[in-house]
């Protein structure tokens, strides 16, 4: 179980670092970085790009892929940070 969380954290971090390679203005990786909400570090292009990269990494690692752009997740929550993403992937794969 713990090993799975480490794998998921690694996938999210790798996806973020790939995005950061295309947008060097983004801050260093932290689970507290906001994707959506007040003081978000992402613009709309970053959000779409990040979830696209993340989807590919999740599939590559043969994990169940939550539908992040689903209205019950992305549009329902006002604040989303990278920790929320890690927890959602973990919950979907338990």
Image (cartoon, grey):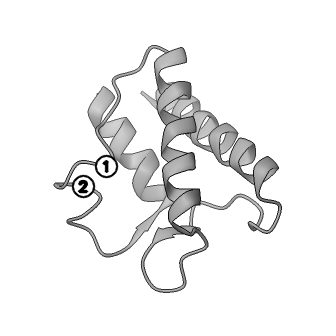
Image side of residue 2 versus residue 12, left or right: left
Measuring from the top left, give residue 34's x and y in whole percent: 52, 70
Mark 2 neighbour class, 10 Å CA radius: few under 14, some 14 to 19, many 20 or more? some
Instruction: Reply above or below: 4 against 42.
Output: above
The residue drawn where x is 77% and y is 62% is 28
Measuring from the top left, give residue 19's x and y in whole percent: 69, 48
Instruction: Reply above or below: 17 against 45.
Output: above
- Is 10 in front, or is 18? 18
The residue drawn where x is 29% and y is 58% is 74
Q: In 3D space, how far apart are the residues under numbered discs 2 and 1 (Cα atoms)? A: 7 Å
**In the current view of this chain or complex, which residue is farthest to the bottom?**
38
Q: Quadrant of residue 65?
A: top left
Give the residue number, with chain letter if any, for mark 2.
Answer: 73
Measuring from the top left, give residue 53's x and y in whole percent: 57, 36
Give the residue number, with chain letter if any, for mark 1.
Answer: 69
Q: Quadrant of the C terminus?
A: top left
């Amino acid at each position: 179980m713990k090993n799975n969380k480490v794998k998921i954290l690694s996938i999210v971090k790798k996806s973020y670092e790939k995005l950061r390679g295309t947008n060097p203005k983004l801050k260093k990786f932290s689970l507290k970085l906001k994707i959506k909400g007040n003081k978000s570090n992402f613009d709309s292009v970053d959000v779409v790009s990040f979830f696209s990269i993340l989807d590919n990494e999740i599939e590559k690692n043969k994990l169940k892929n939550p539908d992040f752009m689903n209205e019950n997740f992305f549009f329902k929550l006002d604040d989303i940070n990278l920790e929320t993403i890690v927890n959602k992937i973990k919950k979907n794969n338990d």
